[in-house]
Image: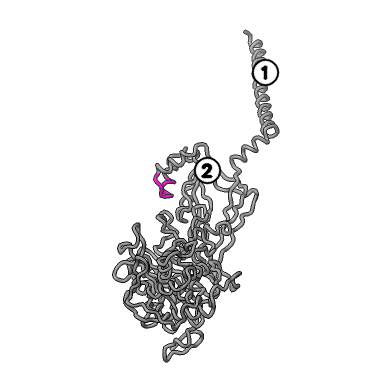
Amino acid sequence: MSRRAQKTAMPQVAGWRLGVVALVFFLLVGALMWRAVELQVLDRQFLQTQGEARQMRTRAMPAHRGVITDRHGEPLAISSPVDSVWADPGQLLDHPEAVTALAELVGMPRARLQRRLEARPGSEFAWVRRQVSPEQAEAVRRAALPGVALQQEYRRFYPSGEVSAHLLGFTNIDDQGQEGLELTYDAWLRGEPGRKRVIQDRLGRVVEDVELLREPRAGRDLALSIDRRLQYLAYRELKAAVREHDARGGSLVLLDVESGEVLAMVNQPGFNPHRRNEIGNGVQRNRAIIDAYEPGSLIKPFTVLAALREGVVRPETSLSTSPGTLRVGRHTIRDIRDYGEIDVTTLLQKSSNVGAVRLALEMEPDALWGLLLEMGFGASTFVGFQGEATGRVSSMPPRDEVQRATLSFGYGLTATPLQIARAYATLAAAGVQRPVSLLHRNGQPPESEEQVLDPALSRQVLEMLETVTQPGGTGTRAAVPGYRVAGKTGTVRKAGPTGYGEDDGYIAMFAGVAPVSRPRLAMAVLVDGPRGDEYYGGQVAAPVFGQVMAGALRLMNIAPDGDALPSGLIVAGGEGRP
């Protein structure tokens, strides 16, 4: 081929190739433009929805549970913000090394975490560990593991610990009431969670708040009638007594006679509400409200009061208790010794079973039974605590002499420590029965009250009970220097499967009032199953009453009885000072 022919062919080939390149370029540009139109116009809504589904989330906003306080505003139960760890199972499982690291950070066996993640296939959310410590939360935050994030929740804390645990109860991990007042007032205390939309990154961390859907509503606070100082005092003394006498348990209730408010309510054995995994076997039971016992000799003041009301006796009436036993049907009633000829006051001072039975048999069959019903035995106190026991009183008056006899010294019926404390508060309030309350009344009088006893008779019996704590009485260990104290000891033999036996043990009790000149406080103490040589109410329960009552009178700045002050002691500022 000549040189001219070659020069003519080369431009033709080059032009063809250039055309192909240009065509391909324009086709690619057209395809990109079409794709852009498709993404930005045709599929915009679909893609936007899909993007938001991968980045936009609706998050719950936890609500603060209401605070429970004592009557002075001191916190008894509060909710504090804590972090919980969660993960996207699919994303985290794609990184085995991250699973291992996370297990170490939260203190969980790797195999257990692996099973937890694998149990939620297709889910984008799984709790890893809830309510971790601040140190653990910070370590997880710094690690920035794929698919792992933190979420804020609230955890319940109880500053008084086991001291108020039976009364307050506790919440579960979702901050919902499970026991005690936390359960009873759960709807009042529980807040309403809020909701918001957020944008989060691939690690589950919130990048931006987009929209507030609902504001969280905090729960309402609850002010109790409890005085935290008296609660600590009562718990300390009851716990010491249960330990000293190797007892199975115990309860104590302290009431304000004038308002009906519960100032202290404690039980043994105790439990720590912060260690929920250790709570079990009924240890969380509020025995002072839920358990009912035969009250024994604590009923004798009401036996005497019924006899006075029926006109069977007068305070100076003489009764024969010789020879210290009394045959009723096929049963023999016994005193611990022969008291001989005694009056009604000595009956209570010495706690004579024979004397009480003689009074009961001289009354109409329904006299004592009806009085006990009027006092509220066998009925709810309506204190507002779930599971409250009503106790038991026969639905019909006692039919025979044996039933009338046993009822006169506190057998054949049951009552809770709260019911017993209320009965003695009624006696102290000149026969006025006020509704008891676990909520602070802020100085407001009770909504309703009822005159169930004659004021004069109530005062007579109260003054008789003062001899119980004086020399010669069965409850001298309940005395408080400088104050007139009225009360009654009780020692109840526990019933077993085959009846009352020596091996079933005893319940030691004491209930009383102070100061007698102007009654302000009423208390019931019960110690269940004391072991050893000391098991009488005057030996076991009366000292607890004396210690707690002395401290309560001092802390509440209640003036001593003027006629009970030791010589050389004067009253200044409402307190006795030398």
Decide: is 49 above or below 289.
Answer: above
For the rendered model, the colour scheme is one colour
Element assignment for label 1:
helix
Residue depicted at x 43% and y 41%:
114
Question: Between residues 141 and 561, which one lies in front from this camera angle?
Answer: 561
Q: Main secondary structure of the magenta part?
A: helix
Kindly identify the amino acid type of the residue bearing the numbered disc 1: Gly
Q: Does residue 107 appear left or right of residue 437 in this picture?
A: left
Q: Mark 2 points at which residue?
A: 125
Callout in the foreground (2, 1): 2
Question: Between residues 521 and 321, which one lies in front from this camera angle?
Answer: 321
Residue depicted at x 64% and y 35%:
47
The mark that comes first in sequence, 2 or 1, is: 1
The answer to whether one can see residue 116 in this image is yes
Q: Quadrant of the N terminus?
A: top right
Among the 4 quarters of the image, the one containing residue 31: top right
- Report x, y in % for residue 498: 34, 58
Disc number for residue 293: none
Q: Name the residue under label 1.
A: 15
Kindly identify the amino acid type of the residue bearing the numbered disc 2: Phe
Label 2 Cα crowd, 10 Å radius (few <14 / some 14-19 / many 20+) = some
Question: Bounds of the magenta span?
Answer: 101-109
The answer to whether one can see residue 515 in this image is no
- Queried whether the magenta region covers residue 81, the answer comes back as no
